[in-house]
Amino acid sequence: MSSFKALQTSESAEGRFETRIIEREVSELPAGEVLIRVSYSSLNYKDALSASGNRGVTRNYPHTPGIDAAGIVVESSASGYSEGDEVIVTGYDLGMNTAGGFGQLIRVPATWVIKRPSGLSLREAMALGTAGLTAALCVDKLERAGLVPGDAPVLVTGATGGVGSIAVALLSRLGYNVAAVTGKVEQTQFLTSLGATQVIERSVLQSGTEKPMLKEQWAGAVDTVGGDILFNVIKSLQRGASVACCGLTAGTNFQANVLPFILRGVNLLGVDSVEIPRSTKASMWDKLSTQWKLPNLNELVQEISMEELPQAIERMLAGQQTGRMLVRLD
Ligand code: NDP
């Protein structure tokens, strides 16, 4: 294969960003020890930002987005990987300034590559994708901070999104009582099918920003949206409880005060899935393929082709995406 198909976002002379499918040469791929034929990628919020010209994600265009990929090694100059190995790559610079998983081939440093765990197919790995890895990291951090299943609910914001929906399913799978916050109440049935025991309209979490504290409710929380909703979550955590903060769809800034921290001893835990050690990623993939394996992965996922990506990106930017978008490349 000397040429391959890839989605490419380019900037027009008027500064508009356009995404279309092109034919690329393998020789155009960046240097790296491992060449991988991508079977599946997935659509994450960061891909939608990259595909719409967000310079905080991607500095230079034209560019192929796709922050995660699962596929088969075609060539490797690194010991540890050989032709035919099934592998996963998520995060680091993939899809940011390195041509990403929305192309049929990627070439990456061996230090980014993880062997597919035996309990997950390549398809299942990308059904989870970066969103699943991030949800797992959030749950892992909460449990390390002392969260255990009990009666009080664990809150998940942005619950119909990629990270949110997997966090709901995972927490439910692990025996937690899950409260899902969403701007799409029409998706209540979807959320209850994933295991949510209550569904809360987003506007409820948006009110009370002016109050210094709110009623103690949540045993823990996974926040995928940030902004003032995050601080309202912090203000309504139970004494000593924690929120794992991983997203920014509601905004990067929030008004805060120290009272929940010094009067209730609550914890704000940051979660990064991108630049963490490969060993941490591998241990999360192992969990997701064994004791944390989700029985309802297929219900969470809609499979699309490369041709359908531009429309899906628009939906994601408008906050209309529900569940996970699996992208079929071969
Ligand atoms: P999705 O677009 O799939 O999900 C985002 C969800 O957020 C939406 O479905 C919607 O859910 C909710 N939402 C959208 N707009 C708003 C708004 N204005 N106010 C409040 N809620 C809103 O994205 P992903 O799941 O891929 O990513 C979620 C977030 O997590 C992103 O900010 C992303 O950048 C971040 N992320 C961070 C990672 C890390 O390493 N820290 C890794 C992966 C993602 P609903 O309608 O149900 O409320």
Image (cartoon, rainbow, N blue to C red):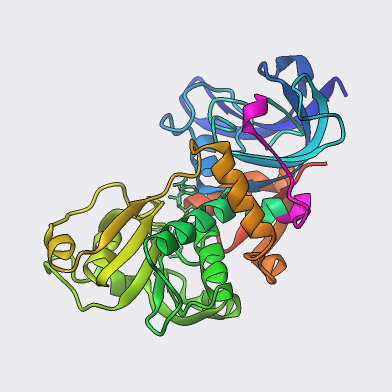
Inspect the magenta stretch and tell me whether residue 115 lies in it: yes
Task: Name the residue: 48% across, 58% down.
Answer: 140
Q: Position of residue 243 (x, y in %)?
A: 34, 61
* Closer to us: 64 or 217: 217
Task: Name the residue: 39% across, 79% down.
Answer: 153
Q: Quadrant of ligand 1?
A: bottom left
Residue 258 is left or right of residue 101, and the answer is left
Asked whether residue 308 is in view, the answer is yes
Q: Indicate the quadrant containing the N terminus: top left, top right, bottom left or bottom right.
A: top right
Examine the image and state in which quarter residue 280 appears.
top right
Q: Position of residue 120 (x, y in %)?
A: 75, 56
Q: Indicate the quadrant containing the C terminus: top left, top right, bottom left or bottom right.
A: top right
Residue 21 is left or right of residue 245, and the answer is right
Task: Name the residue: 68% across, 71% down.
Answer: 296
State how many labels appear: 0
Above or below residue 147? Residue 24 is above
Residue 256 is left or right of residue 44, and the answer is left
Examine the image and state in which quarter residue 210 appears.
bottom left
Which residues are the magenta region? 109-124
Above or below residue 206? Residue 308 is above
Q: Position of residue 71 (x, y in %)?
A: 77, 40
Q: Position of residue 172 (x, y in %)?
A: 54, 75
Residue 210 is left or right of residue 176, and the answer is left
Inspect the magenta stretch and tell me whether residue 236 lies in it: no
Asked whether residue 312 is in view, the answer is no
Task: Name the residue: 18% across, 61% down.
Answer: 261
